[in-house]
Each structure stands twice: as structure tokens, then as C-alpha cells.
Amino acid sequence: MIKKINIENTGLFSAIKNLIETSKSNVAVLVNAEMTMLYWNIGKRINDEIGEQSRAESYGKNIVATLWRQLANEYGTSFSEKNLRRMMQFAEVFPDENIVASLIRQLSWSHIKILIPMTEPLKRDFYIEMCKIDKWSVRTLESRINSLLFERTAISKKPEETIINDIEALKNEEKLSADLVFKDPYFLDFLGLKNNYSEKDLEGAILAELQEFIVELGGDFAFMARQKRITIDNDDYYIDLLFYHRRLKCLVAIELKIGKFTAADKGQVELYLRWLEKYEKVEGENAPIGLILCTHKNEEHVELMQLDKSNIRVADYLTELPAKKLLEEKLHQSIERAKNRLSQNESYNNGKEN
């Protein structure tokens, strides 16, 4: 008679189960990578066949219409006309095979399908690198794009050269700049706040929905304290919310404001940052960053106060979101204004030097 042994207690079953699950996951990744490279090769082969643009419209339509029917009969709906055209677009958007080979090691075909239609290469590169570093699921990637993450991130308001350099540093060195982390505005609609709420109500709602708040802040934020008391010359001050950012390696002090940003807010947060730098910063950390969240700010005030020199950022927050189209228009206008100011400042500085 064979004696039944409880192998659960030995850990053998769990160990074998982990081996099986890991192997299945690795196989799925390899299959996805192979299929995605196949789709790129198919798209490239069709594009090469169509050739010159002068014959692309007529010849291209006919060849794709004929080809998809033949492939569908042989291999099924995966090679429909719509899918073939997506493969062709894939090969157009990513013409370098080496880049594709690198891309498919970390992103699935489902990720890539979402990224292909983007017409702005820098925006697409931003989402690719953020997706890779934060390991976004397909659903998360869609959510980030729909929430206009790129347009809200500080980097979008910088000169093109800065955007390229920051994305390259993220890609090649996994170096994350603060401009890739902080946003404006922040979407706090999940708090459920309506009109006539206080700063205390805002803070309480954030703590009640802390997980959602951290998702909106972005990856790598860790909550440390609320109403952190600091004492300076026997006077007590309180930092609304204190976080730590793992990749930036610094403390982030968040000050919540009901109403418009004022010059006094800068002085208050600057005091907090200097105290944190003196008493809380540990070896190996970078200088703390201040984030002032307000309902409104005057852009010229923000520019003249040169907040970046004090390591302070100011951003609006929205507890109720407007229609996406209106929001998108406002964000694009904000980006254009920011870039125009940068250009004017550069021209002014060049003029002074001459």
C-alpha cells in the first residue's frame, strides 16, 4: 500500500507549481515576440512590394484586397484587410528592425497596436518608455493616454531638445527626470468633492482615497505622513502631505490650497523644503521637492518667481473634469504658451548678451 504524503508541507508542490507558471509565462512572452516580429515583417514586405508613392494608391489597394482574402482563407481572420493595414503601418512607424526587436521584448502586440496610430513621435516615445519602466498593462496604457498624461506632464512644455534628451536618458540609463514625473493639472475627480469644500475636506478625501491619489501622482510615490509637524524657532508648522519618490530619491512635500496660488505660498513651501533638507534628508538622497496644488494660478506670477530655482512646482487640480475635447484644447494652448515664453526668454537673453 502506497502511503500518501502531504507534500504541501514540504514546499515541493509550490516549487514545482512556480516552475510551471514561470515557464508558461516565458513561453507566452516568446510567442508574443515571435508573432509581433512576424507582423512587422509582413507589413514591411507589403510596403516594399507597393513601392513608390506614385503607384501606392491604386496598386496598394488592389494588392492588399487580394492578399488578405488569400491569407484569410489559409490562416483565418488574423490576416484580415484591417489587420494587414495595421501591420503595414507598424512597419512604417518603426522602420528599424533592431528597434522593433528591442521593443517586442518588453511590450506586447496589444500595447504596440495602441501606440501605432500616434502621429507625434515624441509623444509615442514618451509612452513607450514610461510603459516599459512602470510595466503598464494594456488597460493602464489606454487609461494614461485617455487621461492626456503626456500633455499634462511637465516635459511636454519643454523645448523639443529637452524632451528628446530626457526620454533618451530614461531609455538608455533608466534615469527619470522630475519633468517626467510631475503634472499640471492633476485629476482629482475620484475624490467626489463638489463646491464649497475646505482644505481639511480636500486632505481628508485624499487620505480616504490614498491609493487612487498615488496612482494619479504616478509610480514610485510612497506616502510618509500627513500634517507633519516641524518646529522652527519655537513656532510649529505643518506640512499637509509628505511623500518619498523612489526613483528621484527625494522627499516630496505637498501643500494643498483652496483658491489661487500666491507669492506667500512659495515662501511657505520654501521654508518647509529647507527644514526637510536640514533635518530629514539622509545620505544619498537628493534635495526635497515641493508641490503646491491649487485651483488656479497666474502663469506670469509663476514665471517671475522662478520656482524651479527653489525646487518648487505648482499645479492646478481639478475635482470635476470638463469634456475631454475642451480639456485637450486647453492643454495644447497651455503647452504652446509655455513654449512661446521659453522662446521669448531665450531671445531676450541672447539680446542682452549681444
Image: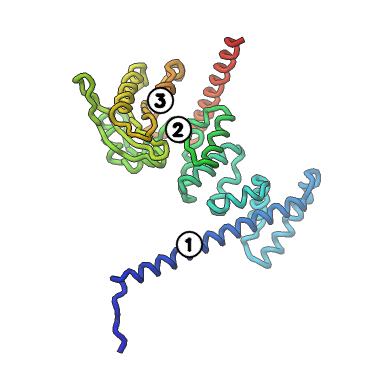
Give the image location of residue 285, x and y in percent: 37, 34
Whether residue 333 is visible to the viewer of this picture, yes or no, is yes
The quadrant of the rendering that contains the C terminus is top right
Answer with left or right where residue 280 lies relative to residue 65.
Answer: left
Compare residues 284 and 56 and report the one nearer the observer: 284
> What residue is at 57 percent from the left and 40 percent from the top?
125
As measured in the structure, the alpha-carbon distance from the residue carrying label 1 to the one carrying label 3 is 43 Å
As measured in the structure, the alpha-carbon distance from the residue carrying label 3 to the one carrying label 2 is 10 Å
What is the number of callouts on the image? Answer: 3
Q: Which mark is residue 25?
A: 1
Residue type at mark 3?
Answer: Asn
The quadrant of the rendering that contains the N terminus is bottom left
Give the image location of residue 3, x and y in percent: 29, 84
Residue type at mark 1?
Answer: Ser
First in residue order: circle 1 vs circle 2: 1
Whether residue 145 is visible to the viewer of this picture, yes or no, is no
Residue type at mark 2?
Answer: Ala
**Whether residue 246 is situated above or below residue 261 in the rendered picture:** below
Q: Which mark is residue 178?
A: 2
Q: Are marks 1 and 2 in contact (CB under 8 Å)?
A: no
Tag 1's secondary structure? helix
Answer with left or right where residue 62 lies relative to residue 91.
Answer: right
Residue occupied by mark 3: 311
Q: Quadrant of residue 298?
A: top left
